[in-house]
Image: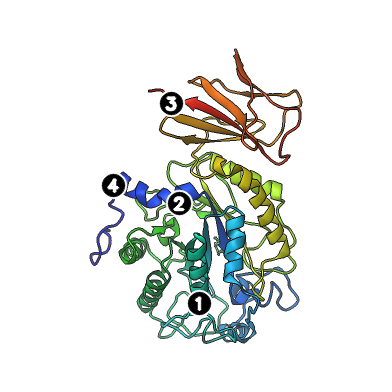
Amino acid sequence: MAASQESPDYRNETTAEKDARMQWWRQARFGMFIHWGLYAVPAGEWDGNSNHAEWILTTAQIPVEQYEKFGPQFNPVKFDADRWVRMAKDAGMKYLVITSKHHDGFCLWDSDATDYDIMDRTPFKRDILKELSVACKAQGIKLCFYHSIMDWHHPDYLPRRKWEKRSADGADYPRYISYMKAQLEELVLRYDPAVLWFDGEWEKTWTHEEGLKLYDYVRSLKPEIIINNRVDKGRHGMQGTFDTSQYAGDFGTPEQEIPATGLDYDWESCITMNRYWGWNKHDKDFKSTEDLIHKLVDIASKGGNFLLNIGPKPDGTFPIESIERLKHIGQWMAVNGESIYGTTASPFTGLPWGRCTKRIDHDKTVLYLHVFDWPSNSHLRIPELESKIDTSYLLANHEPLETSSDEKGILIEVPKESIDPINTVIVLEVKNER
Ligand code: FHN
């Protein structure tokens, strides 16, 4: 089915045009995901259970009129957009994706299309997205929106949840699509997001035809915007892969997983720091800083982006465990960021001691060897390279390193001790063949 007639087919762009549009995103490699809304109020608890989070309306089968009562309790008086953006920036993140509206339908901005929003249903009465857009612009971080197609609150959204008593009589799904498009226009024209990160596309009422039209509609509002593959119906589950020739979307979206190898199109793994996306006060199962840095490097070594999630508390603060991890990741990125930003997939597979990222400059190729397991014999081995190594050194202090080659490949003489026990980066510069 051709794309919508009322706007050009934005998917019909040249490789050079797409490369230009994706350039900042490919350079960025690392972003913050934020899941925040009314679901932070119950903090994962309902009726004696504590295993809920952003899905609590459904997982606890809370009738909509009862769920709405979280509104008057949502008063995040400690919310500070500048502080949130500063924590993302100091962690080395270049963009921030926040839930403008999750599946529960609640809107974190002052929408003209509904009163089910932060301004009309909470005592807070401040436009969260507006404050974040100002802070992001001031600090040079790209503001992006997660927006759910599935909406458990809007009377025109179908299907109803199976357990719901709320009648579906009079529900008009096309009218819901018009509502969603009106809200997307508000979001794009008022807050100028760099990415629209759709989700909740899996229910049967949302179709491939509508996905193609919505992609073109959002691009018509801001032609340079970037849109994920969950705008359409092509996503293969949590792998997040899709057929880019058939389905709309500018990048794939593996969720809670990292592809075994790179993909032959842009992709971004979204992963939680603990178990849940939204705030659950009992969820102390946080990944270590070491694990998170290794994930960042593994993803970059395969040519992907890492979208790392925070689930803020109902008072507007980040969990302390998240703050600590962001700070430590930032310390590593402050020294080693160039080995992540703007790099592409490794020329090697299966390095036993770590990963490799690559950057091609006009006159040289730079290989960044991320050494997780420091060699005990002061020698690091890598496979043979096609070109001669020009220079080799430790990224952190530029200490030069000696290299040699034998029948098994290349040997790099390294100091007895690593610089960073989590990941010490060695640089190899190779002159580009003329
Ligand atoms: O149902 C959502 C979930 O709550 C969360 O937003 C993740 C993050 O991408 N996406 C969906 C599950 O695939």
Residue indicated by mark 1: 107
Identify the residue shown where x is 68% and y is 55%. 327
Q: Residue 229 falls in which quadrant of the image?
A: bottom left
Q: Quadrant of the N terminus?
A: bottom left
Q: Amino acid at mark 2?
A: Trp
The disc, 4 or 2, on the residue closer to the chain's N-terminal end is: 4
The disc, 2 or 3, on the residue closer to the chain's N-terminal end is: 2
Identify the residue shown where x is 72% and y is 51%. 288
Residue indicated by mark 2: 25
| Above or below 29: residue 136 | below
Task: Tell me the element at label 4.
Answer: loop
The disc, 2 or 1, on the residue closer to the chain's N-terminal end is: 2
Residue indicated by mark 4: 14
The disc, 4 or 3, on the residue closer to the chain's N-terminal end is: 4
Measure the C-alpha gap from mark 2 to mark 3: 25 Å
Residue indicated by mark 3: 432
Decide if residue 30 is on the left or right side of residue 158: right
Tag 4–tag 1 contact (CB < 8 Å)? no
Q: Quadrant of the C terminus?
A: top left
Measure the C-alpha gap from mark 4 to mark 3: 27 Å
Whether residue 199 appears in this view of the structure is: no
Task: Tell me the element at label 3.
Answer: loop
Where does residue 79 sit, x and y in percent of width and height?
Answer: 62, 74
The CB of the residue at mark 3 lies under 8 Å from ligand 1: no
Where does residue 76 sit, x and y in percent of width and height?
Answer: 63, 78
